[in-house]
Image (tube, rainbow, N blue to C red):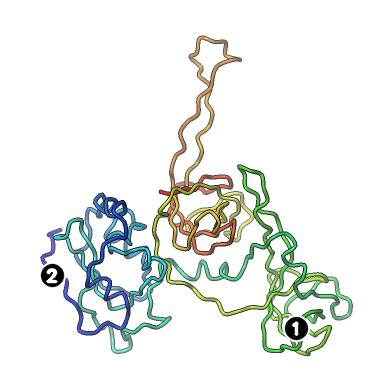
Amino acid sequence: MQKSNIAPSAPRQWNFLFAGVLALGMSLSSAGAAEQGNDIKLQENALDRYIVQKGDTLWGIAGKFLKDPWRWPQIWRMNQEQLKNPNKISPGNVIVLDRAATPARLVLGETVRLSPQIRTEDSVDSVIPAIPPRVIEPFLSQPLVIEAGGLDKAPRIVATEENRVHLGSGGIAYALGVGSDTKTTWQIYRPGKSLIDPETKKVLGTEAVYLGTGRVTRAGNPATIEIVSSKQEISNGDRLVASGPVTINQYVPHAPSVFLKGNIIGMYDGLATSETGRDSVVAISRGKRDGVEEGHVLAVLRAGSNVPDRESTVSRDAAPTFSLPAERYGLLMIFRVFDAVSYALVMESTRPVAPGDIVQTP
């Protein structure tokens, strides 16, 4: 493809903060990060310009220009503050590859009106997400990682209508500790499996199993709770947690500034399998206390096996062994962080992802 000689131009008026960053062409916050930008590899057929469409993701757009889409912030020249408070791209924005810069960079060109119905404005519906929101939205409120005994003081179900053992949608339960609030929607949980670090064998937290939602139809102690939805059967002793609005952050995919290494300790693809793959959610054994942030991109590796040296002069029964190197086969992106555990979306994978696989700074 012929290289573009289009000079990026600044629109007359941008309704989002992203414009200021791009117009100035700000550099990365550290010299080390700037050096990394020099080895950014463009796609062989990288576009000269791209008009953002509804339904795009930042990861998908970056893949039109870069061989490593997670290096998006480097080619945008984003600094650390912008990674924490990302700016926004909307349908109709024109992204231009400035090949004249060293290294190459992406900037915004004139905004295009896609149709009379689409307006370029900073709204929840118009902002392009980093990753598909439909996949991660359920995990922004559930499952939930809690410390041991973390649900002990939460409101609890103490009885069910007609002493039923299990309840589903439309059932009636009675709960203590709810108070007089009749407007709050309650999520219903019970303690689940322990999340264990495969290296230290320490319990990193307990996963609360999400059962469904309920609403108060009559205040009191106990309060009357109508089960609005259920994913699993609900019983006496199950706990209630107030449900707030789900907010999908404007994640910016980026590599950690320090070396991180952990393991996959949980998988959630809706199937009862021991392996998963692309677009599935996994839990990893590292969290906020280890320096993990939302938007961090980590490589996924399979540890090499121990192989005996069959040609050794020692007897076959006592043949020495050697370890094969770990092989990288995928990428994941962190979207929810707890103290010692994080949830991530598998973005790329050339083989099934399995518990115990290694995750580390790419």
Amino acid tagged 2 = Ala
Name which quarter of the figure residue 77 lies in.
Answer: bottom left
Q: Residue at x 29, y 51 (%)?
A: 36
Q: Nearer the viewer, residue 283 or 26?
A: 26
Please identify the quadrant where the N terminus is shown: bottom left
Tell me residue 351's x, y (percent): 47, 46
Residue 16 visible at all: yes
Question: Where is 248 relative to 39, above or below?
Answer: below
Residue visible at 77% across and 75% down? 155
Can see residue 63? no
Residue beneath disc 2: 7
Q: CA distance from mark 1 to mark 2?
A: 61 Å
Residue furthest toward the left? 5
Amino acid type, mark 1: Glu
Q: Position of residue 44 (x, y in %)?
A: 22, 53
Residue at x 47% of width, y 31% of height = 324
Q: Considering the numbered disc 2 on the image, is that residue within a helix, a strand or a loop? A: loop
Residue drawn 61% across and 42% down?
199
Q: Which residue is mark 1?
A: 226
**Mark 2 neighbour density, 10 Å: few (under 14) some (14–19) many (20 or more):** few
Q: Nearer the viewer, mark 1 or mark 2?
A: 2
From this view, report whether residue 106 is shown above or below residue 246. Answer: above
Q: Secondary structure at mark 1?
A: strand
Tell me which numbered mark, 1 or 2, is placed earlier along the sequence.
2
- On the picture, is 243 further left or further right than 111? right
Determine whether label 1 and label 2 are within 8 Å by CB. Answer: no
319 lies above or below 298: above
- Please state the horizontal and vertical placement of residue 265, each as a whole percent of the image: 60, 51
Mark 1 crowdedness (10 Å alpha carbons): few <14, some 14-19, many ≥20: many
